[in-house]
Amino acid sequence: MKTLTWTVVVAAAAMALPGAVLAQDITIGVSISTTGPAAALGIPEKNALEFVPTEIGGAKIKTIVLDDAGDPTAATTNARRFVTESNADIIIGSSTTPPSIAISTVANEVGVPQFSLAPLPITPAREKWTAVMPQPVPIMGKVLYEHMKKNNIKTVGYIGFSDSYGDLWLNDLKTQTGAMGGITVVAEERYARPDTSVAGQVLKLVAANPDAILIGASGTGAALPQSALRERGYKGLIYQTHGAASMDFIRIGGPSAEGVIMAAGPVMAPEGQADSALTKKPGMALNTAYEAKYGANTRSQFAGHMYDAFEVLKRVVPVALKTAKPGTPEFREAIRKALLSEKEIAASQGVYNFTETNRFGTDDRSRIILTVKNGKYEVVK
């Protein structure tokens, strides 16, 4: 397992200084998927660490990054290593839902704040120490289902990952469209993240001939059914979740990506936001820095999730430092409380207002709708 550590040079230099107190550093353990099926999410998340602060409130940030390859067992091991070996004050990760759930279990067991970079079901057992950076499925789903209603969609098919992310979207689709009325789910299929073919599932969906199809997947895996459906001649609208919002989706989907309707965060198109939008400044800052290094049109919603975790920390860490020192249970508790006391935390993907029970913290300001036209994303007004 490859380990990348930021601020190692800073830490080494500090050790050489008389009277240096390394215990004052804030240690952040990051477990993300830089290899495996979710690498398209994890790599931009890792890249975003180049554009986050290395010091907050006068305290240096020591960031330890481990790859979990999207495996919940590896994510669990990483989280425990952060706690036992590094005395981490904060854990960030993972890139997808299953390993994020695994990290949440550890974080809530030992009492360390976790910032998940993937949506996950928040149960009472996860409410205390887990905060979620991506937009919740119901907020993103609602804008898609409203688009379906406006476009006279009566029947919808579903194909999604055969894991907790796919479950979240299928359950939300049924719940919200059922409450809205007028839209019926007529077919549902699942596939595994590492699958390289969904031919059988797509044949069943095409045979059901729904007016539209929702794909509940993330990363490059979201392009697999998109391409297969168009290759099999499906002509209806295809909807994608915010888990697919990346330039890699267009690259892999090619011509089949044209016309997709996709929920996304505002970081994918901050230029079109009003100057009064609180998400515009951080979105522009991230995209300008990211694309200056990685090239035009490399912006990523997933980079935004990592960047936003630090935008939140920029607000809550100074508050926590007033009452406790890093490396202590008191500091972790102070971070948790500051998450509740700080309001209207502006970031690239939304404006966060966390509560004891709302661990996502975002509202309608955290979503836009995109389509693909001539190989580029465009905002659907």
Image (cartoon, rainbow, N blue to C red):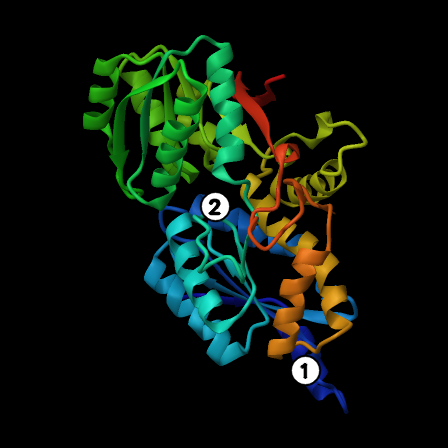
Image quarter (top left, top right, bottom left or bottom right) of the N terminus:
bottom left
Label 1 packing within 10 angstroms: few (<14), some (14-19), many (20+)? some
| Front one among 342 and 56 | 342
Q: Position of residue 307 (x, y in %)?
A: 63, 50
Can you say whether 67 is above or below 265 in the image? below
| Front one among 47 and 102 | 102
Residue at the disc numbered 1: 22
Q: Which mark is residue 236?
A: none
Q: Position of residue 262 (x, y in %)?
A: 50, 26
| Front one among 343 and 368 | 343
Q: CA distance from mark 2 to mark 1?
A: 34 Å
Callout 1 secondary element: helix
Hey, what amino acid is under mark 2?
A: Pro
N-term mark: 2 or 1: 1
Q: Position of residue 47 (x, y in %)?
A: 58, 51
Callout 2 secondary element: loop
Q: In the figure, residue 112 lies in which quadrant? A: bottom right
Q: Is residue 180 visible?
A: yes
Mark 2 or 1, which is nearer the eye? 2
Q: In the figure, residue 339 lies in which quadrant? A: bottom right
Residue at left offset 47%, top offset 79%: 84
Residue at the disc numbered 2: 119
Q: Position of residue 41 (x, y in %)?
A: 47, 45
